[in-house]
Image: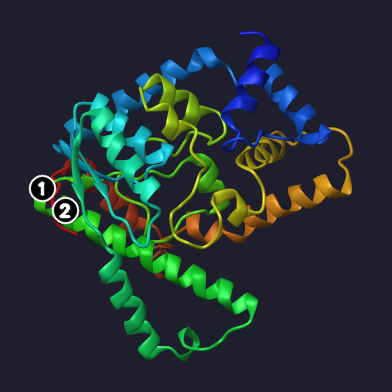
Amino acid sequence: MTHKSIKELYFSLNKRGDKPLTLSKHFEDSLDRHIERGEFDIDHIPQIGLGIVQQLREYSSKHRVHKVVVGMSGGIDSALTASLFKSAGYDVTGVTMPIHQSEEETERGIAACKALDIEHVHIDLTKAFNYMVKFYKDLDIDFNKELVDKNMKQQAVRKGNIRARLRMITLYNLASKQGGIVGSTDNYSELAAGFWTLHGDVGDVAPIQSLNKSWEVPMLADVQGVPQDIIDAVPTDGLGIDAGDEAQLGFSYAELDIALLNTLHGDHGDNPTQQDQDTIDRVIERIGSTVYKRENPVNFDHPITADWRYQQLGGLDMNLITPNLGED
């Protein structure tokens, strides 16, 4: 494809409903440079998919695991993740778990399971969530106050974390019952931005964690046969914190990915406007403030034996790969 056609495709992939993607001159010029470097090459997308599928097959053979459960949010990440596991020969169960959820999102999750021809399980967690919130309200006076806007946002985040962790409890319980694993649906952009809940919306194997959200995820989703309405859906984590992912982040996934690529290359282009710089600063601040998530859990060397124990345990793991499936 020509530079122009790739750029047009990139803009079409990042529109939100009827709202087209808009980029400032600084970000658009940066995008042009990345396209010229071949970082948005359409020909690589099928190869990326084949490579992930092969690695999933190798994981299945190595650990003797053939079943996986995936939380189906109605979004592109979960649908793509489920499709890749299926392509690798896994027995995939897609789970819709609404919690005061938009009915449209839930219906998309169900439709994705049908389109991908995978088993579907529906578990409404609204009642359990309400109980958990009430339980913590009884323990925590902050949940009962008329709070200022800042604290209301903090309360929304805490409730969002309860949602994510309740869903993961549900997925691991089902995976344990089936003797399988839980598939992670997070992508590289979310990884960099720390846009997930620790011990919440993560799992055992993350097929798309190396793929950026604004280009590789939607392009591979199309190759994998993910329904178009799911590819085009406004990204949302379904946690009720804000009006979609990008509203919560404070920048678009396109701006995140471009700013991240600029930073990784050490190539920030021409002098950005103050508005551009504010966006770049928010991206960098977000990445820097979530380093602790990417380091979790933090392990410390034994004070005396240094790293000897981890090295020896790692060697033992390589020789004794005998997973206890269905157990934590």
In the visual, does 296 lie left or right of 147? Answer: left
Q: Does residue 277 show up?
A: yes
Residue 280 at x, y = what percent?
75, 47
In this rendering, the count of numbered labels is 2
User: Which residue carries the number 1 mark?
Assistant: 178
Residue 205 at x, y = what percent?
31, 42
Q: Residues within 10 Å of mark 2 (few under 14, many from 20)?
A: many
* Residue 29 vs residue 295, the one in the foreground: 29
In the visual, does 203 lie left or right of 13? Answer: left
Residue 192 at x, y = what percent?
56, 47
Q: Above or below — where is 210 with respect to 183?
A: above
Q: Are marks 2 and 1 in contact (CB under 8 Å)?
A: yes
Q: Secondary structure at mark 1?
A: helix
Q: Quadrant of the N terminus?
A: top right
In the visual, does 306 lie left or right of 269? Answer: left
Who's the residue at 66% across and 40% down the image?
260
Residue 191 at x, y = what percent?
50, 47
Who's the residue at 69% across and 24% down the image?
34
